[in-house]
Amino acid sequence: MATERKRVSKDQIYDNWAKRNVHFEVELEESVIRQLADYGSGATRYNAARGCILGAGYEVYILAFFIGLYAGVRRPLEGETKAFGQPVQYWGNLESRGERSGYPRLREYIFAAAVARTDFDLLAIERGDTPLSKGISAMILTMDEYANYGLHLMKDYLEEDRHYFSGNTAMLNLFLPLFEKMNAGYVHDDVADGDDDPDPEPLD
């Protein structure tokens, strides 16, 4: 008698995904993440006084992820990598510290994007035909590669002007061309390597 496979619900997939850590290239810690966020200390009211544009380090990752997603470009991680140390389920859960409200809906958007952009059979995971851990690992890899492209693009901007992201319209100027690309439509993701990064938009 064949053993019945245990079905997996979408909630179980989400919960297991949310328990995972995401990763970044170690070389980007000083050049990007610590330039924009108080990495290692979380989001506090003192960040602005320290000159931090963002709060916790994972906020830089989130921004970078959406840059890669909207650009439609993934960049495989190279060299030494590091986990953020803050599982996805805790992103934005700072209500108890009184600094800001959480953003669970944003985590849901990221999850939906990771599912949609990962080349795997979601139904096979739900049926129990494919191990849940394999599917989750593929989703995290998708996120890491989108974010890696975004982090390298942010690095390019910072190298050209270390105060670039302090500008009032910096984020708008960064994302508008990406939205235009999305509206124009693209069929599949590109995969970038170290020589394929587009030049930053002019800063004037």
Image (spheres, grey):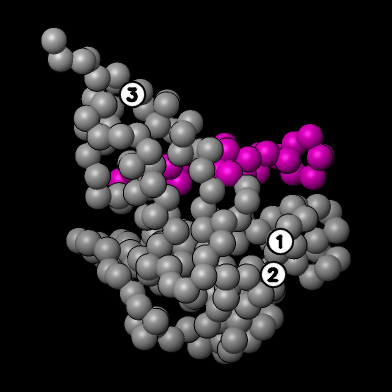
For this orientation, the residue located farthest to the left is 1
| Residue 70's disc number | none
For this orientation, the residue located farthest to the top is 1
Q: Which residues are magenta?
A: 87-116
Look at mark 2 in the image and give the residue it sits on.
Answer: 34
Percent x, y of residue 71: 37, 67
Look at mark 1 in the image and give the residue it sits on.
Answer: 39
Q: Relative to residue 185, is residue 35 drawn left or right?
A: right
Q: For this rendering, which residue is in front, 113 or 83?
A: 83
Residue found 47% across the figure and 73% down from its top: 79
Q: Amino acid at mark 1?
A: Tyr
Residue found 63% across the figure and 51% down from its top: 85
Q: For this rendering, which residue is in front, 10 or 77?
A: 77
Mark 2 surroundings within 10 Å by alpha-carbon count, few (fewer than 14), some (14 through 19), many (20 or more): some
Q: Are marks 2 and 1 in contact (CB under 8 Å)?
A: yes
For this orientation, the residue located farthest to the front is 1
Look at mark 3 in the image and give the residue it sits on.
Answer: 8
Q: Amino acid at mark 3?
A: Val
